[in-house]
Amino acid sequence: MTTRGQSRPIAIAIVGLGFGEDFLPIYQAHPDVGRIGIVDTSRARLDDVGDRFGIDDRFERYEDVLASPDWDAVHVLAPVRFHEEYAIAALEAGKHCASAVPMATTIAGLEAIIAAQRRSERVYMMMETSAYGREYLLAKHLYDSGRLGTVSLYEGFHIQNLDGYPDYWRGFPPMHYATHALSPVLALTGARVARVTARGSGLLADDRVNSAFDNPYASEVGLFELEDSDVVASITMSFFQTARTYTEGFNIYGSQMSLEWPAFDSDPLRVFELGPLDPHQPATGLRGRRSLVSDAVFLDPAEALPADLVRFAEDFEIAPAGGGAAIQKNAEHGGSHPYLVHEFISSIVEGRAPLVDAATAAEWTAPGICAHDSALRRETVEVPRFRPT
């Protein structure tokens, strides 16, 4: 990717304040960010959030931000159906663009964003939380150091009941949101998915069917074959009619060490380390090699983040601009948000591609699109390439 670095403070507009509010204090604290604007169709929400965070630049129309030369970048956190349109519009307006997942929901949409990024020579980054959460960062450390060994098995999952969510989520194809469950193994190994075989599980009740989507399934399960690898990633996605507390994570098994996601948020991530084979195998009873089990010890965020952002990797509090009691905030998605913000802003400042650039985002998003297609067709589907071989 060709782009020019930027030495002056970056002016960025946050688009969509439902999820976007979580990122505002991080951008405000980043040393390379200057002016911050907020965009939302709700005037009441604009004023509430703007007053709380002391932000004066407030827009009800996204187009007004794109038309102004005052803004260098946007972070799109609007509903999924706007991601493709808003990203392309930002790039064509000469703005750098960060976008929540998924990148788009069609292969044509992925290709259109890649083309817009190449024409604009601006930064595009998909803000994939699972590739920056404390759990993934630990897995990457163990993998890069060789302690994990060779990856032999991967399971990703995202189970979440969307009843009561805004109506545009009703009937949403679960595999179209597969990046959280699938991306960690792709980020870790640098591999792409070559083909996928998926099936639907459980039919949607009539009140959950949505004519906006070609989706009859409450859940979808897929086997994702990695190119030039003997590893198959198993992915389970469920958004409806499954009685389970929200869980989104992965289990990764290596030839020397493995990590398993906790069943409940209050439980620790488990680390398994393969012990030596006992040379004195009993004639009866337990055989094989045992694994030592321990609780995960996560990496220190101070090693990777600017000092001003470290506190956002754990639960934190903010002081309202207008005064009053401090507001307690959770470090959602494994404390990934400050890492995402720092990578996006740093890529602009340094004039380089971010880790999850347009081509990478497409490689992480397309398998889920193809998996839903596979479930509908009940056959294996090849996943297209987005880079030269």
Image (cartoon, helix red, strand yellow):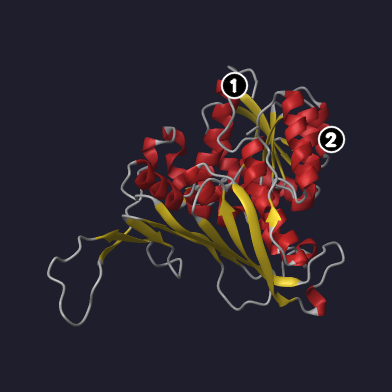
Nearer to us in this view, 109 or 64: 109
Which circle, 1 or 2, is nearer the viewer?
1
Q: Measured along the vertical axis of the image, is residue 41 above or below residue 64?
A: below
- The mark found on residue 63 in the picture is 2
Camera sees residue 267: yes
Mark 2 neighbour class, 10 Å CA radius: few under 14, some 14 to 19, many 20 or more: some
Q: Is mark 2 on a helix, strand or loop?
A: helix
Q: Is residue 241 left or right of residue 116?
A: left
Residue 50 appears at what percent x and percent y? Answer: 68, 43
Residue type of the residue flagged with mark 2: Glu
Residue 234 appears at what percent x and percent y? Answer: 55, 62
Residue 204 appears at what percent x and percent y? Answer: 76, 76
Given contact means CB atoms under 8 Å apart, are the residues at marks 1 and 2 in contact?
A: no
Q: In this view, does 243 lie to the left or right of 328?
A: right
Identify residue for label 1. 351
**Image quarter hosting the C terminus:** top right
- Please give the name of the residue rendered at 33% of the width and 41% of the height, measured from the top-left corner: 145
Q: Earlier in the sequence, mark 1 or mark 2?
A: 2
Q: Residue furthest left?
A: 280
Residue 306 appears at what percent x and percent y? Answer: 44, 32
Nearer to us in this view, 106 or 129: 106
Q: Measured along the vertical axis of the image, is residue 37 above or below residue 222?
A: above
Mark 1 neighbour class, 10 Å CA radius: few under 14, some 14 to 19, many 20 or more: some
Residue type of the residue flagged with mark 1: Gly
Nearer to us in this view, 30 or 345: 345
**Image quarter hosting the N terminus:** top right
Q: Measured along the vertical axis of the image, is residue 276 above or below residue 60?
A: below
Residue 376 is drawn in which quadrant? bottom right
Q: Is mark 1 on a helix, strand or loop?
A: loop
- Please give the name of the residue rendered at 78% of the width and 43% of the height, measured from the top-left corner: 109
Camera sees residue 330: no
Nearer to us in this view, 321 or 265: 265
